[in-house]
Image (cartoon, rainbow, N blue to C red):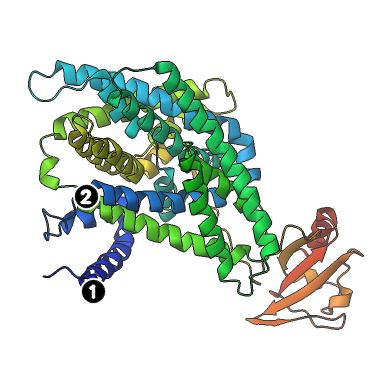
Amino acid sequence: MTITAENILLIGSILLFFSILTTRAGHRFGVPTLLLFLVVGMLVGSDGLGIEFSNPKDAQFIGMIALIIILFSGGMDTRYHEINPVAMQGVVLATLGVLLTALITGFFIYWITGSLQDGFKFTLLESLLLASVMSSTDSASVFSILRNNGIGIKQNMRPLLELESGSNDPMAYMLTIVLIQAITMQSTHWVNMIGLFFYQLVVGAICGFVLGKVCIRTLKRSGLQSEALYPILILAFAFFTFAFTDFIKANGYLAVYVGGLVVGNVRYSQTGGIRNFFDGLAWLAQIIMFLALGLLVNPHELLPIAGIGLLIGAFMIIVSRPIAVFACLAPFRNISLAARFFTSWVGLRGAVPIIFATYPWIAGIPHAHIIFNIVFFITIVSLLIQGTTIPAVARLLQMAEPIKVRQRSAFGIDFPQELNSAISEVVVTKESLRNGNLLRLIDLPENTLVMMVKRKGRFFIPRGNSIIHEKDHLLLISDSEEELNAAKEIIIGTTL
């Protein structure tokens, strides 16, 4: 087949369609969806259907664009009030935890490769580089698996793991870049390396915060004619945040995550549409990124490194990740022993380590292609072993609970944060109508109003003499949360 733009579009659409359909099988068997996307890419690659894709620069570019979208979307989905109680624990895991994992694993790689009688041997810096590339986690897959199995997590562990997985990629990236520079330099100036490390961390966070505030201010003052343009404007800010921060040699990935965190915690009239836009875009970015990475690897090249890959992967799962987690969480007495073990087990490797493995490859680091194949193999091992056993481990550690399904709003209304009123929805019960079925007979607090009623798919604005039926949905607005709660108790409804 002649490679044309039309053929690329045809093949790409088929792969995209097939990848989405495989998610159903993943849900059914508890397999992480990203593993299925990687497998699809491998099946159609050079060792499968024969589609050639061997350019690490193209894969890195695709991964960079996808990561910007995924990290920004992840930041937007993170709520301040949820992460505040676990913010310190999450930050420690995302920084010190990544560093400890990289150091412990790196020294093990140096020892094990040096002990091999035949085959390749990594220097200490190369060993630390390989470990650093693999040091970030992908907890998003964890919650996808748990949600598909109808399992929630006790002890407020969800926001902790979400914060860790959302913010530890920048740390792994910094370690990777610093070690690449150390290997390629004629002489290693560790003071400069440490200075560069902290510069990237601090300046990256500042850029993300400042540019996030600028984005919010622009949104509120732009006055765009079409609401469809607002998510595109935010996307442009996300790309600009990464590019500008990287231009001044700071950490663009950290800036993007912080920027998304800032933008996502401010509500405006377009919030609902913007979130839906970024949720869909993040899924598209993940699928394209995983397919590209699956195409990049040649499965027959994984066999020679399978032995060392299994050793390193097992060591990370059983030794280095648990040591790092227990060391980081030691000062926090409010986290139970079971929660610490569960946190240790859910340190899945995802697509990010594979993307970071292209950096040594492009930089011409010795053994870079071997590093890439080892990282790819360990990612598959991690997803197969840890990913498929998470529900069982959660139940074994008694960390599982029935998932709390958030009911969708009956009214589909998203109010701006600037609106100084408390708003909620309730469902009318028989007890609500004990004094009669007219709205004026429901004794609401003085400053509380029923704005709208939904009945069997029909909406209407009620008056005092409007007849209220059992199972009607009422949209309430009040001057304060206290009065709103009092109104809900009077109605004896169920908050949605």
- Numbered label attached to residue 187: none
Give the amino acid at mark 2: Asn
Q: Outermost residue toward the right?
A: 446
Mark yes or no: residue 77 visible.
Answer: no
Vertical comparison of 444 with 309: above or below:
below
Determine the image quadrant of residue 463.
bottom right
Please name the residue that numbered disc 2 is placed on. Answer: 55
| Image quadrant containing the N terminus | bottom left
Nearest the viewer among 395 and 64 is 64
Residue 447 is situated, as x and y percent measured from the top left of the image, at 89, 64
Q: Secondary structure at mark 2?
A: loop
Relative to the observer, which residue lies in front, 134 or 29?
134
Residue found 78% across the figure and 80% down from its top = 461
The residue depicted at 50 percent of the width and 46 percent of the height is: 244
Q: Is residue 417 left or right of residue 11?
A: right
In the rendered view, tell whether residue 450 sits above or below residue 29.
Answer: below
Q: Residue at x 34, y 18 (%)?
A: 188
The CA span between labels 2 and 1 is 21 Å
Mark 2 in CB contact with mark 1 (< 8 angstroms): no
Q: Is residue 447 visible?
A: yes
Q: Quadrant of the C terminus?
A: bottom right
Q: Earlier in the sequence, mark 2 or mark 1?
A: 1
Whether residue 357 sits left or right of residue 252 in the image: it is: left
- Near mark 1 (Cα within 10 A), the count class, few <14, some 14-19 or many ≥20, is few
Q: Position of residue 487 (x, y in %)?
A: 82, 62
Q: Which residue corresponds to mark 1?
A: 6
Residue 107 higher or lower than 215, as above or below: above
Q: Name the amino acid type tagged 1.
A: Glu
